[in-house]
């Protein structure tokens, strides 16, 4: 087992696609921890028992999500559990999608309904929100396929834009949020939702919001 593990660690960086189910997973999770090769992740160099190691989201996705479900479903009133738990589930869902895009739907179906706590309308009480209910599963597949499809459309459109000389959307010093916001609003009027999606993507991934319509810092580049 030791030898197998050291080989798994060695090859971790080189492996680009998910490992087949019958070979050790070599996913590198979050940069500093990686799958130990048998379904659980460990900090590099750490030697701990399985019980203390979290499940690997790439090769042990069902258990990874089931753990998150348990944490997010912890009853209110226990120590430290008066907070909302929705973010626990959302963070796990993000990691599962990223690390096992081909297997996340089957894993979600197996894990089943998840009840999380969110702040109620009056902010003083928590209410329960249901994720991953059986009736939501077909909608989940439809939504995720749609997001993948528009990502593909955006890649092709952005390739065309690069060929036309566009570049630098991620350079905040020269390409401001105000400029991207103005472009977004202009493309709403032009009517192609794909262009609007591209500008919305740029602002979102830069962590910015759409500037007010009357923002004065606009200079046209067309
Ligand atoms: Zn793994």
Image (cartoon, rainbow, N blue to C red):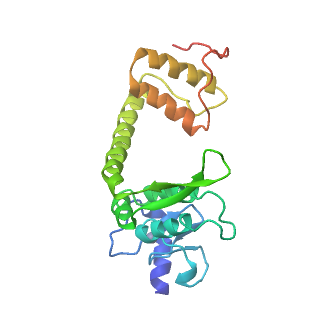
Quick check: 19 left or right of 89?
A: left
At 64% from the left and 53% from the top, the residue drawn is 125
Q: Quadrant of residue 178?
A: top right
Q: How many marks?
A: 0
Q: Is residue 112 left or right of residue 211?
A: left
Residue appearing at x 65%, y 17% in the figure: 215
Residue 170 in percent (x, y) is at 58, 34
In this orientation, does residue 129 appear? yes
- Residue at x 50% of width, y 70% of height: 67
Q: Where is residue 72 drawn, in percent x and y? A: 55, 63
Which of 80 and 215 lies nearest the eye of the viewer? 80
Picture residue at 58% right of the left edge, 68% below the top: 75
Instruction: Please tell me in which quarter of the rendered image ligand 1 is found.
Output: bottom left
Query: Is residue 110 found left or right of 199 in the rendered image?
Result: left
- The reply to whether residue 175 is visible in this rendering is no
| Image location of residue 98, percent across then percent down | 45, 55
Residue nearest the viewer, comparing 118 with 4: 118
Image spot of residue 59 (x, y percent)? 41, 69
Residue nearest the observer in this picture, 6 or 207 = 207
């Amino acid at each position: 087992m030791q030898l197998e593990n050291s080989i798994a660690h060695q090859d971790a960086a080189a492996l680009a696609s998910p490992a087949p189910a019958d070979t050790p997973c070599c996913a590198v999770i979050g940069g500093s921890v990686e799958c130990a090769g048998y379904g659980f992740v460990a900090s590099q160099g750490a030697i701990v028992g399985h019980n203390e190691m979290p499940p690997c989201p790439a090769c042990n996705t069902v258990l990874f999500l089931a753990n998150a479900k348990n944490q997010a479903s912890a009853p209110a009133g226990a120590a430290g559990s008066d907070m909302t738990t929705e973010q626990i589930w959302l963070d796990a869902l993000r990691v599962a999608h990223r690390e096992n895009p081909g297997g996340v739907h089957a894993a979600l179906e197996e894990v089943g309904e998840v009840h999380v706590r969110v702040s109620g309308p009056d902010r003083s009480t928590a209410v329960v929100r249901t994720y991953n209910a059986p009736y939501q599963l077909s909608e989940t597949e439809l939504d995720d396929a749609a997001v993948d499809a528009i990502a593909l459309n955006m890649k092709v459109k952005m390739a065309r834009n690069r060929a036309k000389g566009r570049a630098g959307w991620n350079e905040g010093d020269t390409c401001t949020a105000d400029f991207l916001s103005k472009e977004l609003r202009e493309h709403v009027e032009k009517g192609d939702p794909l262009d609007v999606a591209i500008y919305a993507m740029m602002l979102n991934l830069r962590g910015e919001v759409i500037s007010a319509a009357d923002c004065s810092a606009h200079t046209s580049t067309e």
